[in-house]
Amino acid sequence: MESLPNLMALKCFVPPASLSRLMSSIRHAPLLKLFIDTGLYQYADDQFTAGPTGRESLSIKWNVDDNFHEPDSALAHLYQFIQPSLTTLVELRIDNTPTHRLTDFDFQLLKPAGDTFTAFHYVLRTQNDSILDVIPEVFPHLTNLAVVWMVPIDWRGGHSILWKDGHIRALAKNQKLVELTLSSDLEVAAKAISDTCIIDIEWHLRCYKRRLAITEEIAQECPHLGACSWVLRGMDDDPMVHPFFVEGRMSGDKAIRVVRGVEQWWMGGDHDDWDGGEGIVKSKFEDLPGEVLRCDRVDIAKWESGYWRSGW
């Protein structure tokens, strides 16, 4: 790295056993942003590796399982890597997806960063939804929050936790929130089990309506929310995103919050009902609930090929 003395950002694929060598090579680089991807099916190394100091942004895809002789060593190593930058971090993204023992990161360990954190993105493989209550207590100044549950697939095709009304109360604690991303399962929560298996135009419409309604409720509780996206996965594990924008308006003398969807490929015209084979699915813009931002007014590429498909 000596040939790149002005390097400010680095993305690197490195297994845990090579982290120490990487840290030595960048110790004097003026890096502000660092992205680490351990690769799949890795195990915690025998030795802890202290991460970099003074970083403002860390993104870590931690596909690491415990060392055979040390229970909980994978998460202990992850914390050891993050800890040196806790007092300077503004943004942290953790993809905590071990293959075997599924455990969650203890956010209380990150409390020293609570005054500086404004963005926190977390991917996990457990069904722990209590983190929605913990996050605003540990990080009270968040403006950008993403939580994606990647629960292993089961018989009903689920990839996430079930949405609960109590989640709105938890999200309401984030009073500075501007951007929100969730992957909650609204289909099974609505007892629409077939919607986890049957993917047609009507399925897209039903999923869209459910997320629009919940986003409207969240927008009433989070006064600064400007964007809310929902990550949804079907039986083929292919992700799609339902993005919404929120804006404040005046209705007479009353201030209101308006949620608008973003144009997607299935919108704009009526379609045959693929599943039933009879009838028409009304998905013209004028027939959709609420307002829809058209493609010429929004950079759709961000949603279709950028954020989630790039893995950050």
Image (spheres, rainbow, N blue to C red):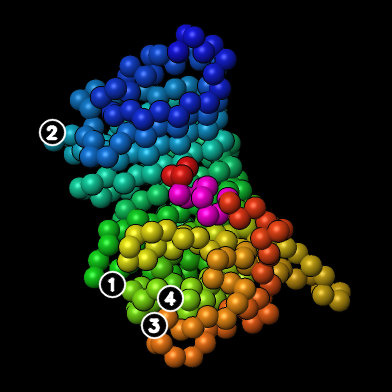
Q: Which residues are magenta?
A: 302-309
Q: Quadrant of residue 126?
A: bottom left
How crowded pointer 3 is (Cα within 10 Å; few <14, some 14-19, many 20+) is rated as: few
Q: Which residue is mark 2?
A: 69
Q: Which residue is mark 3?
A: 275
**Residue lying at 55% horizontally and 66% vertically, measured from the top left:** 265
* Extreme-bottom residue of the structure: 278
**Residue lying at 48% horizontally and 22% vertically, measured from the top left:** 53
Q: Is residue 174 left or right of residue 86?
A: right
Dominant SS type (magenta): helix
Above or below, 46 relative to 238: above
Q: Secondary structure at mark 3?
A: loop
Distance Cα–Cα, label 3 vs label 4: 6 Å
Q: Earlier in the sequence, mark 2 or mark 1?
A: 2
Above or below, 208 relative to 145: below
Q: Quadrant of residue 159?
A: bottom left
Q: Earlier in the sequence, mark 3 or mark 1?
A: 1
Mark on residue 200?
4
The answer to whether the residues at label 2 and label 1 have Cβ atoms under 8 Å apart is no
Distance Cα–Cα, label 2 vs label 4: 48 Å
Q: Which residue is mark 1?
A: 156
Q: Secondary structure at mark 4?
A: loop
Going by the numbered disc 4, the residue's amino acid type is Asp
Q: Is residue 308 left or right of residue 119?
A: left
Residue 188 placement (x, y as % from top left): 37, 75
